[in-house]
Image (cartoon, rainbow, N blue to C red):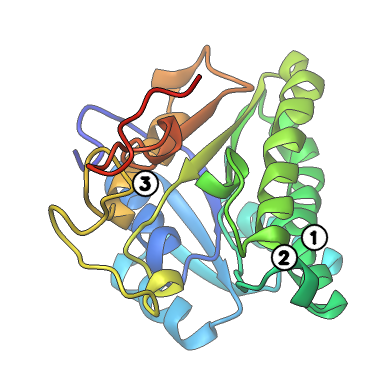
Amino acid sequence: MAGQGLDLSGKVAIITGAARGQGAAEARLFASLGARVVLTDIFADEGRRVASSIGAAAHFVCHDVGDENGWAATVDTAVKEFGRVDVLVNNAAICDVHPLVDQSLDSFERMLRVNLIGAFLGIQAVAEPMKAVGGGSIINVSSQAGLQGLAGYGAYGASKWGLRGMSKVAAIELGPFGIRVNSVHPGMIDTPMVAHLDVERGPGGHPGAPLTRVGTPEEVADVVAFLASDSSSYITGAELAVDGGASAGRVPTPTATAVPR
């Protein structure tokens, strides 16, 4: 779709985790739709390359989302460079796959720090600047793992379920100020985060999803851009799955067609 029919002209967006994958796709799409974009990531060289490829409508900030002081600097940069903040995309995330009983405390806490606390700090940081311009849109990128349990994803799932719940609370609290908050739940998307998985790309490569294939970063970016745009002006507190139908339920197989009783 590549944002067909959407318009982000005049909007200024902060997108975290924008050096590659979904975040980079979102930044490029936003700019193509008329937005000015502040990209943040810990991968400075890659982030600067993405921003440079976009041009004058983009500015890169090296920022760990778990750093509260870094959030203040990021928002200050957005206001200094582009004059305002209209959109926040909390996209940055890390994933470490372990059975719960084998997960280290450090690993569990680090995942919560980036995936959940980072978004919490971001919401706090942009609330006042958004109020100052009469509203805005916050899109929290959760996961299919925030809609259902996935073995091996205990810490990741905890962070993404938490993000889903926090999005609804933020929607309630910030709605009176014209600030919308929604969560997006990607399934298996062809990004560096899943590059290590033995999954075929293309039709038939993801039998766990009714659409039978892995998604693309651009397909997630389309949904995020819709939620950032005025086309979604009466949508808040919602959760949108972008997972090829994987969270809808179990896909039947020849050996598992019995009706549950």
Q: Residue at x 73, y 39 (%)?
A: 129
Q: Is any part of residue 20 visible from this angle?
A: yes
Decide which of tag 3 and tag 2 comes sooner along the chain: 2
Decide which of tag 1 and tag 2 comes sooner along the chain: 1
Badge 2 crowding class, 10 Å Cα cut-off, few under 14, some 14 to 19, many 20 or more, is: many
Badge 1 crowding class, 10 Å Cα cut-off, few under 14, some 14 to 19, many 20 or more, is: some
Q: Is any part of residue 228 visible from this angle?
A: no
What secondary structure is marked by label 2?
helix
Q: Disc number at residue 114?
A: 2
Quarter of the rendering containing residue 56:
bottom left
Quarter of the rendering containing residue 55:
bottom left
Give the residue furthest to the bottom: 45
Could you tell whether 186 is left or right of 112 in the image? Answer: left
The total number of labels drawn is 3
Could you tell whether 52 is left or right of 232 in the image? Answer: left
Q: CA distance from mark 3 to mark 2?
A: 20 Å
Percent x, y of residue 17? 54, 65
Q: Disc number at residue 220?
A: 3
Percent x, y of residue 191? 37, 67
Q: CA distance from mark 1 to mark 2?
A: 16 Å
Percent x, y of residue 19? 46, 72
